[in-house]
Image (cartoon, rainbow, N blue to C red):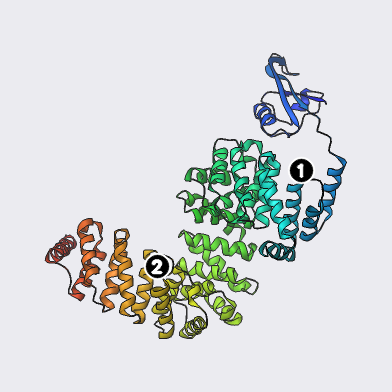
Amino acid sequence: MYMCKVKVLANCSSRTLPLFTRNHVPRVSLSQTRILLSSWKRKPSDVVATSQLLLGSTVLKGKVGILVPVIAQAYHTTKPRDPALPGQVQLNQKIISLKTVEDQLKLYKSVECPLNVVNRVSLLYNIAKIVRRNKKQMQVLRQIRNESNVHVLNGAYVKLLDSISADISRCFPRCLANVMWSLGNIKEENHCLLQSCEDKIVSCDMSSFTQPDIFQIVKGCSLLGTKRMKLFLKLEEAILNGGVAISEFKDHDLTLVVVSFAKDGSGSETLFNFFQSEILSRNLMTYDSHQLAGFVWAFAKRRQSCLSELFEQIENEVLRRGASTMQSVPMSMLLSSFAKVGMGSESLFSAFDSELVTRGLQTCDNTGLVQIMWSFAKRGIKAAGVYNVVENEVLQRGMSAFQNHQLVVLLWSFIKAEKCDAELVKIASDEFLQRDVKQLQGDHLSQLVWALGRARIKNSELFDSIEQVITQCRPLKMKSFEIIALMRGYVEAKEGSSELFDYLRCEIIRDIETLSGDEISEVLWCFSEGKVNTPALFSAIEKEIHFRGIESFNTTQLKKIKQCFLTVGEGSEELFELLKNVDIEDEEENAC
């Protein structure tokens, strides 16, 4: 047992302190008050922090008559560790030395004396490190995990997780962080250990975790990809009340935390405002391109209202560096984030367009290729040379190289940008005929139909197979704008049976109160052009118009609504009287 005595002058920096004392003063960056608090909050697990505050005054050399308050002394008393048993030390060394998952589990299965919880966590942690470095070992672990009735080591794996879960209350903060990180790396989402570990972490004071512990916890949650709302809410509270000081985070650690909150769908607007302030308080020149892309991706995903200043400053920094300095992955990530929120100047997209045309896309993987194409189309950049580069690259790789959703987004982007010839659309539609469209989610089905309809491609076989999926398989509930896009595609392609339009009509009527003015006018146009007798739909929409009042619609929407009712011969006299009066008022306003 020993004691370390530290004298600290109030309000002096760590560089100034050694000038007034013969004793060594640790280098710190916080005030003496924060240092003292830190000694309580961040103390090692084997240290008991005790302090004695004696406020007095002293005269600094060379500054006659100037009094400075002094903290006389603060003590850290180290308590002795319980001596580790020789067998436990040897066992831990053995765990660290093993290089395969099977060897780790065989060791656990062969040990006669029961392992303490620290050894078991160490074993799980080393398994996670092994599979993180070696993809083949990850396949071995999956095989052990999935073959519960066949593989001889499955029982050892399950028993290991069960035993840690049973003793989770005995785990120190560092052990809890190691468990969460390990579960994330081995992608263990189903075992009860995950929930018990999260509950234990949430029950702790977050200040009991060191910064590396917090980063391990956050990284584990991020790798799992499952919602851990309670844990992130606890972390948010600690960040906002100062229990976890993000100002002390390194740049890459700050990026990890911000991105993880966004991936989990957690974090209030207050927290993201806090993040933005911290991000912008630092010199943007110190962030690498992956970190800048991570920030805009996180804010775009959360759709926070506070993002404009962040996006503007990051855009300026990217333009200052030049597009040529950015690698393919952060480039596609950054462009898609700007496009998603409708931001990014023509100068930004023009700079990346020139760079992509010069650089080419041979080194870009399919995901990045699709993201880049979607970004330019979504942002409405039509005069871009990158479209030809993407088209050539797609044809060179072949349609079969792309997954279903990637091919849909590519096709949608080409049509949206009006940069696609009929031959490419035909090749893509023929490719979908060879695939099972049942694998497509509702949003991708609607995008595919919209693109094919807008391109005026006649492929009745493909439209019929998609209709069968919609009317018989009934995909996951589609959002209103997805149904409308799907309906528009069928109308423009002059495809679709009465059964399909009956189904779409029922879906629209069910959610009619959620439709915007543009969506209502679009629905009316589709059914008036589709030549489908749907008086029930027009009646329901008329009631909705009366309920909202015509002041809820703009002039363009009202004119379109009126034209659609006239086309199908529907609508009451009261409705047309309202629409007629609006037309008269508009004419009077124009005359004035």
Q: Is residue 384 visible?
A: no
Where does the image place residue 29, in percent across and percent down from the top left?
A: 69, 34
Where does the image place residue 348, in percent across and percent down from the top left?
A: 53, 62
**Image marks 2 and 1: residues in contact by CB distance under 8 Å:** no
Q: Nearer the viewer, residue 316 or 562?
A: 562
Where does the image place residue 88, in percent across and percent down from the top left?
A: 83, 43
Residue at point 82%, 49% (across, down): 112
Q: Which mark is residue 185?
A: none
Q: Amino acid at mark 1?
A: Asn
| Mark 1 closeness class: few <14, some 14–19, many ≥20 residues within 10 Å | few
Q: Nearer the viewer, residue 578 or 122?
A: 122
Q: Nearer the viewer, mark 2 or mark 1?
A: 1
Where does the C terminus fall, quadrant-wise? Answer: bottom left
Q: Nearer the viewer, residue 432 or 86?
A: 86
Q: Is 162 on the left-hand or right-hand side of 349?
A: right
Q: Which residue carries the number 2 mark?
A: 482
Secondary structure beneath dot 1 equals loop
Q: Which picture quadrant has residue 362?
A: bottom right
Q: Nearer the viewer, residue 6 or 490?
A: 490
**Mark 2 and mark 1: span between their CA atoms?**
55 Å
Secondary structure beneath dot 2 equals helix
Q: Is 489 on the left-hand or right-hand side of 367?
A: left
Where does the N terminus fall, quadrant-wise? Answer: top right
Total labels: the figure holds: 2
Residue at point 77%, 29% (across, down): 25
Q: Which picture quadrant has residue 42?
A: top right
Q: Is residue 467 visible?
A: yes
Q: Which residue carries the number 1 mark?
A: 116
Relative to 18, does residue 213 appear above or below in the rendering?
Answer: below
Q: Amino acid at mark 2?
A: Glu
